[in-house]
Image: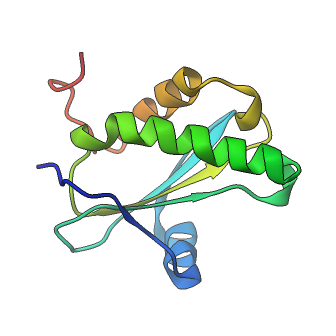
Amino acid sequence: MSQKKIVTLNQNSQFKRLYSKGSSFVSYNLITYIKRNNLNISRVGITASKKVGISVKRNRAKRIIKSSYMKLFPQIKSGFDIVFVARYKTCYLKTQDIYENMFKHLRNAHLIDEKIYN
């Protein structure tokens, strides 16, 4: 069910495909786009636009999103592309706050099995 290595999305066309055709889940500090990719692996992308703030804030936002994803990674089903978009408040929050919202988004998308979560 889980994979060992994190594979990232790095092509603009891959991100655009998720933005236009993927399912989205929105909270005040995170937006999540999800779409099936017909592969045996799940791929992830993390973005933070200039609306988030200067580069230091954008990098912090991406860093805490990545940290939250690393905690959830073993529980996520394979075969999906996932993009996380930082929002303005993301860089001011702790990893645990982002983790909770990320978990809710992935659970609502049926990518995390309830039985695995403690």
Colour basis: rainbow
Quick check: 23 above or below 11?
A: above
Q: Residue at x 75, y 50 (%)?
A: 58
- Find residue 3 and report its horizontal and vertical position in percent: 18, 54
Say if residue 105 shows up in the picture: no
Q: Residue at x 46, y 71 (%)?
A: 9
Task: Identify the image quadrant of residue 74.
Answer: top left
- Find residue 4 and report its horizontal and vertical position in percent: 19, 53
- Find residue 70 and report its horizontal and vertical position in percent: 38, 41
Task: Identify the image quadrant of residue 47.
Answer: bottom right
Which residue lies most toward the left here? 1
Q: Is residue 90 left or right of residue 114?
A: right
Is 33 or 43 nearer to us in this picture? 43
Please state the total of marks drawn on the protein image.
0
Quadrant housing the C terminus = top left
- Find residue 95 and report its horizontal and vertical position in percent: 56, 27
Quick check: 27 above or below 45?
A: above
Quick check: 93 above or below 107?
A: above
Say if residue 60 shows up in the picture: yes
Q: Is residue 1 left or right of residue 106?
A: left
Quick check: 74 above or below 114?
A: below
